[in-house]
Image (cartoon, helix red, strand yellow):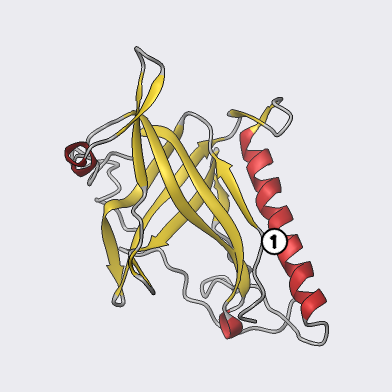
Amino acid sequence: MENLKSETIKIVTPVGTRFRYSYLVTPDEYLGVEKWKTEALIPVGTKIKNEQGELVEATVFIVEKLEALLESWKSQLKAAFPNKNFTLTKSSKTGKPSFPWSFEEDNLVIRLKKNYKGMKGINTPVTFYKHDAKSGQNVLMNQDERQEMDKISPETTGQIAFLASGYDAGGNGVGIRCLPLSICFRDIVPWQGGGASDFETAEPASYEEQTTATAADF
């Protein structure tokens, strides 16, 4: 299936997106693999513009985009390999399909990750911008400003642009991956330690899902 590639779509989250479990400057290392990663939390009720420039509910719009991409990828796989059975990636905890998006209380949570190293060496890091309220412009952060974002409070807000595409991991299943491209920070809250900090939590150092082979789903 080396020549079969999924469609790739770009999504930009609305202003007010929060970030937690963030390893955006220093990558997280898990089982010898380093990744830049974060979870984007989008409040239910937030508005975003669709392709026609109309304001729509952001979480519904984004989920519909991701679900449509998954269905398109599944159709593409079956068209290319009609006699092959495919299984969706499953959570080892629940045995149910596991995707990089889910609803948690009043937020849509999107798990984004990007390998630190690729076949050609170190990949391009996530680009950081900051919003200048006076000029209304988004300004590229310099290296010193980037380092200050190594540890951030999950109350930090902004927007994130990411790419979504389908993958086929063989026995570990078929699904959608979300790869962070750039972040525009608006309200930067430094990490103070303790409390609700994403660095003081029971969440494992890596939120990689362990998967198991299951019966075919399509």
Where residue 164 appears, as percent x and y from the top left, is 58, 55
Residue placed at 54% from the left, 58% from the top? 100
Q: Quadrant of residue 186?
A: top left
Residue nearest the viewer, comparing 127 with 32? 127
Q: Height in image: 75 above or below 145? A: below
Residue placed at 65% from the left, 47% from the top? 63
Query: How many residues crowd mark 1 within 10 Å: few (<14), some (14–19), many (20+)?
Result: many
Residue placed at 66% from the left, 65% from the top? 6
Indicate the quadrant containing the C terminus: top left, top right, bottom left or bottom right.
bottom right
Q: Quadrant of residue 184?
A: top left
Where residue 201 appears, as percent x and y from the top left, is 29, 53
Where residue 30 appears, as percent x and y from the top left, is 31, 71
Which residue type carries mark 1?
A: Leu
Seen in the image, is 91 located left or right of residue 215? left
Q: Is residue 154 visible?
A: yes
Callout 1 secondary element: helix
| Identity of the residue furthest to the top in this view | 134
Residue placed at 58% from the left, 61% from the top? 99
Indicate the quadrant containing the N terminus: top left, top right, bottom left or bottom right.
bottom right
Residue nearest the viewer, comparing 206 with 92? 206
Q: Height in image: 177 above or below 158? A: below
Q: Which residue is mark 1?
A: 70
